[in-house]
Structure formats: C-alpha cells, structure tokens
Image (cartoon, rainbow, N blue to C red):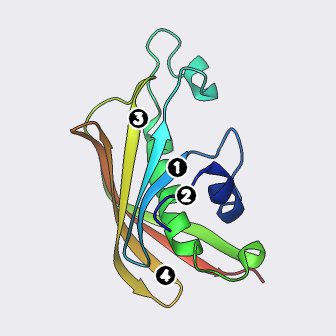
Amino acid sequence: MDDLRIDEIMRILPHRYPFLLVDRIIEIEREQRIVGIKNVTINEPFFTGHFPDLPVMPGVLTIECMAQVGAVLGLIDQSDLENTRVFFMGIDRARFRRPIVPGDQLRISMEVLRKKGTIWKMQGEVRVGDERAAEATLLCSISKAE
C-alpha cells in the first residue's frame, strides 16, 4: 500500500477539518519512512488572521503536518485504531527555511530514527518543489487508550 487517499487517511487519523493537515500519502515503508502531501490553498481558515495582507502558513501548523504524516506511519499497522492514540511528546531542531503560502504543495517526509516500546522518534522535512521549507525532529508516544 504505497498510496493512501483522504478516505483512508481519515480512517487512520482522528483529525477532521479544519485540523486534518494531510491530503495524501504517496510513499510508505512500514515502520521506516513515509511521504505525504498537503495542498495549501487560500481557503485555509488560518489565512484570514495570519496575515490578512500577506498569507503565510503558521510554523506550528507546518510542524503539525509533519506530526500527522508521522502518526499515519505509526498507526497504519494498528489493529485497534479506535483505541490507539498518538501523543506529541517533543520537538527538537525545528527550522523554517522559507514561508509557506497559498498555492504551495508540501511534500512531507518522515523517517523513523528510533522506536523503543511506545516511543517513536522521527526526523521530518517539508519541501515545496526543490526547496526545503522546514525540518524538525519529533517525538511521540503511540499506545492503547486506557
């Protein structure tokens, strides 16, 4: 399964509009790496206030895109999605290299650096065309809900 469309992503992730920030998964290597796509449009609700005269995607939402793509990788093989949760635990080395604006297509790559028990550490990169827009190392916990 190398390509997931939005209906399959919504089966895996609990996020919904306006907070579902991944449109498609185009590559998956189970428990190793994943690549997702986010199409950025002027219709995004955050652009009305960030910024009215110069629409720029907030950096925290760029990080959230990475986190959601990484969550798909961690959740895709879970048998009980309804009772499995992903919790964001930390972020290191976040860098923003260029503004993300309406019309950009984000290519979000996440690579597993380490997995120990329920804790996953992933390196993320967001590209727009040939340009690196952002990067960060993310830490999350994937476990059954109590």
Labels 2 & 1 near each other (Cβ < 8 A):
yes
* SS of the residue under disc 3: strand
Q: Residue 117 at what x, y percent from top left? A: 50, 91
Mark whose residue sits in front, 3 or 2: 2
Residue placed at 43% from the left, 39% from the top?
Answer: 59
Ranked by sequence position, the earlier of labels 1 and 3 is 1
Is residue 7 toward the left or the right of residue 82 in the image? left
Residue placed at 44% from the left, 43% from the top?
Answer: 62
Q: Residue 135 at what x, y percent from top left? A: 30, 51
Disc 1 target residue: 24
Labels 4 & 3 near each other (Cβ < 8 A):
no
Separation of residues labelled 1 and 3 (CA atoms): 11 Å
Disc 4 target residue: 119
Separation of residues labelled 2 and 1 (CA atoms): 6 Å
Q: How many labels does the image show?
A: 4
Disc 2 target residue: 4
Question: Does residue 49 appear in this view?
Answer: no
Mark whose residue sits in front, 4 or 2: 2
- Taking depth in this image into account, of 5 and 83 the one nearest to the observer is 5
Labels 4 & 2 near each other (Cβ < 8 A):
no
Ranked by sequence position, the earlier of labels 3 and 2 is 2
Q: Which amino acid does label 1 sit on?
A: Arg
Ranked by sequence position, the earlier of labels 4 and 2 is 2
Give the answer, above or below, for where 130 lies relative to 1: above
* SS of the residue under disc 1: strand
- Taking depth in this image into account, of 1 and 54 the one nearest to the observer is 1
Q: Dot 3, how many residues are within 10 Å of its Cα: few (below 14), some (14-19), or many (20+)?
A: some
Separation of residues labelled 4 and 3 (CA atoms): 30 Å
